[in-house]
Image (cartoon, grey):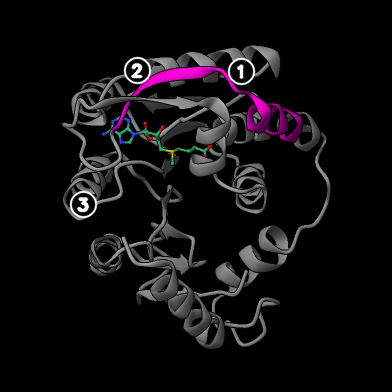
Amino acid sequence: MYSPFKLLSKYIRFKVLASNAKGHGVHSPFVYNLIRKVLLDNRKFYAYESIEQCRRDLLKDKRVLNIQDFGAGSRSQKTNQRTISEIAHSSLKPKKFSQLLFRIVNYYQPENMLELGTSLGITSAYLASAKDDSKLVTMEGSKEIAAIAQSNFEKLNVKNVSIITGNFDDQLPAFLNRQDKLDFVFIDGNHRLEPTLRYFEMLLPKTKEGSILIFDDIHWSEEMEMAWKQIQDHPQVTVTVDLFFIGLVFFRKENKVKQHFQINF
Ligand SMILES: C[S@@+](CC[C@H](N)C(=O)[O-])C[C@H]1O[C@@H](n2cnc3c(N)ncnc32)[C@H](O)[C@@H]1O
């Protein structure tokens, strides 16, 4: 993981080099559309308020959970105690990006979705609420965290989501064997080079024209930047959009030439 100073300097460099936030000069109708219709869509959707209220409640929740720490290594069985409030402060995607995920689903209308890394269920609730006739499966290694996410789905009355509890390394292959194609995957856990690329390779046969993969924290560490570069270079990947904190991967046969964009968001 980069130091806060290094990350900040990378962010400043990104901001200077990235394309205009309004899409001017972006020579791809597909990405121009993404910018104008999704990134810049500032409507307040109905689901936002109840999910953000749930986040506010989690940020104040002092109940202590025994959690398995999967952060440093997926095989790690180290357990420790953290309050829900601490987890909510450190692990959840901020509102700006959670709501962007909502709008991506709302715009592209994926049917079958997968999330790696449920945590307390905030992004899962956004993804599932954006298309309530879709099916979202979300995976979380830590049982006590998954139980809180489940209770949040019940509170928010989100019905089209199911949690698989267990290590991605064990659960993902079994899930993918049962699954036909995936339209949307958000990879938000185990941010290291080898597992990220391994999950990417496992997901590839389940993608189709129009599938979207979203990787979190692509500039968080040297390993994640290497993983992002290798994903961009993969022959099946045709368009990528780097928003610094997340990276979007598209599979579009129409794009004969690979295109990578860095967009100010
Ligand atoms: C960054 S949090 C997810 C945040 C969530 N998507 C949100 O923004 O609301 C990552 C989660 O992935 C879980 N995780 C990380 N590595 C894992 C692994 N190898 N297997 C299962 N879960 C894992 C962690 O326990 C943690 O709760």
Q: Earlier in the sequence, mark 1 or mark 2?
A: 1
Q: Earlier in the sequence, mark 3 or mark 2?
A: 2
| Three-letter code, disc 1 | Phe
The image shows residue 214 at horizontal and vertical percentages of 44, 51
Looking at the image, residue 236 sits to the left or right of residue 241; the answer is left
Neighbor class of circle 1 (other Cα within 10 Å; few <14, some 14-19, many 20+) is: many
**Which residue is disc 3 drawn over?**
197
Image point (33%, 66%), residue name: 2
| Three-letter code, disc 3 | Leu
The image shows residue 183 at horizontal and vertical percentages of 45, 40
The image shows residue 225 at horizontal and vertical percentages of 30, 67
Neighbor class of circle 3 (other Cα within 10 Å; few <14, some 14-19, many 20+) is: some
Report how far apart the C-alphas of labels 1 and 2 lie in the structure: 15 Å
Looking at the image, residue 152 sits to the left or right of residue 229; the answer is right
Quarter containing ligand 1? Answer: top left
User: What numbered label is drawn on residue 165?
Assistant: 2
Residues drawn in magenta: 52-69
> Quick check: can you spot residue 232?
yes
**Which residue is disc 1 drawn over?**
153
Compared to residue 244, the image places residue 69 above or below, namely above
Q: Is residue 126 magenta?
A: no
| Three-letter code, disc 2 | Thr
Quadrant of the image containing the N terminus: bottom left
Q: Quadrant of residue 229?
A: bottom left
Contact between labelled residues 2 and 3, with CB atoms less than 8 Å apart: no
Contact between labelled residues 2 and 1, with CB atoms less than 8 Å apart: no
Compared to residue 105, the image places residue 151 above or below, namely above
Q: Quadrant of residue 163?
A: top left
